[in-house]
C-alpha cells in the first residue's frame, strides 16, 4: 500500500526564518507534486517534480525530489506571512493515475 | 488556463436526500477524480474516471456513485445522504501524466 507521510504536520515560524517540510513515500514513484491550500479554498498546484534530482523554485519556495530515498522536500526561505497555508505533497501510484496525498503541513508564519 | 467548475460552493441537504455534485472541466482532460477532505484525514479518493462511461472505485466509494456520460462532466451522487458525508468535496481533472487541476470545492452539510 502506498503511503505518503509529511512532517511536520503543523509549523509555526517567524517571518524571515528558513524551514523545510518533508514528504516521504513508501513505494516506487517517479512523479511528485506539491500543492498549496488556503483556508476554505481548493488546492493550487505549486510544483511538479518528474525525475530523480529534480529541483524547482518559485519565489521563496524550493522543492526537490530524491526518488532513491523516496523523499521530497519543500524549503521555505525567509518566510513571509503570505506563505501561511496548508501544503500537500502527492505521489502518483505507479501504473495508474491515482494520486496519493500526504497528510498536509499547516504552516503559520508569524509577523 | 484549465478550468474545473464545481456547481455549488455550499450545500445543505437533509438526511436521506439524493444529492448530486456536478463537476465540469473545459480542457478535454481524460481523467477526472472526486475526493473528500476532512480535518485530520486529508484527501481521500472516492471515485475516478479515465474516460467517458468509465469509472473506478477509489479508497472510500461506499455510499457514493458517479456518472460520466460526457467527457467534460463528472458527477458524484450520494444516493441517500447521511450526516457522516458532511465534508468538503473536491473534483479534479488531469490529462495523461500531468498534475491535477482542482475545482473550487463544495462544502456539503447533511443535517
Image (tube, coloured by chain):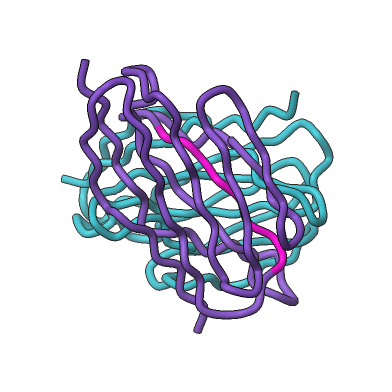
Chain A: drawing colour? purple
Residue at (40, 24) in percent of width and height: A78
Which x, y percent locates residue A80?
36, 19
Image: magenta residue range: A30-37
The answer to if B89 sits in the magenta stretch is no
Q: Colour of chain B?
A: cyan
B84 or A1, nearer to the observer: A1
Q: Residue at x 47, y 67 (%)?
A: A24
Q: Is A15 placed above or below A103 here?
A: above
The image position of residue B88, as x and y in percent, is: 35, 43
Main secondary structure type of the part rendered in magenta? strand
Q: Who's the residue at 46% across and 74% down the image? A: A3
In this view, the residue farthest toward the bottom is A1
Of residues A24 and B21, the one nearer the viewer is A24
Q: Position of residue B85 (x, y in %)?
A: 28, 56
Of the pair A17 and A97, the residue shown nearer to us: A17
B44 shown above or below A78: below
Q: Above or below — where is A12 with respect to A49? A: above
x%, y% of residue A2?
Answer: 52, 78
Amino acid at each position: 500500500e502506498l503511503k505518503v507521510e509529511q512532517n511536520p504536520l503543523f509549523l509555526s515560524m517567524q517571518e524571515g526564518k528558513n524551514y523545510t517540510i518533508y514528504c516521504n513515500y513508501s513505494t516506487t514513484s517517479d512523479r511528485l507534486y506539491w500543492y498549496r491550500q488556503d483556508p476554505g479554498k481548493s488546492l493550487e498546484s505549486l510544483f511538479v517534480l518528474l525525475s530523480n534530482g529534480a529541483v524547482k523554485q518559485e519565489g521563496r519556495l524550493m522543492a526537490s525530489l530524491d526518488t532513491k530515498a523516496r523523499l521530497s522536500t519543500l524549503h521555505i526561505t525567509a518566510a513571509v506571512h503570505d506563505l501561511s497555508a496548508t501544503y500537500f505533497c502527492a505521489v502518483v501510484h505507479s501504473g495508474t493515475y491515482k494520486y496519493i496525498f500526504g497528510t498536509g503541513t499547516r504552516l503559520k508564519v508569524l509577523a | 488556463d484549465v478550468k474545473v467548475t464545481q456547481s455549488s460552493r455550499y450545500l445543505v441537504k437533509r438526511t436521506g436526500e439524493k444529492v448530486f455534485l456536478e463537476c465540469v472541466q473545459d480542457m478535454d482532460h481524460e481523467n477526472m477524480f472526486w475526493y473528500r477532505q476532512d480535518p485530520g484525514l486529508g484527501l481521500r479518493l472516492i471515485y475516478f474516471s479515465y474516460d467517458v462511461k468509465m469509472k473506478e472505485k477509489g479508497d472510500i466509494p461506499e455510499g457514493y456513485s458517479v456518472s460520466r456520460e460526457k467527457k467534460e462532466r463528472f458527477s458524484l451522487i450520494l444516493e441517500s445522504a447521511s450526516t457522516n458525508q458532511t465534508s468538503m468535496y473536491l473534483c479534479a481533472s488531469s490529462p495523461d501524466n500531468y498534475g491535477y487541476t482542482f475545482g473550487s470545492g463544495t462544502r456539503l452539510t447533511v443535517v
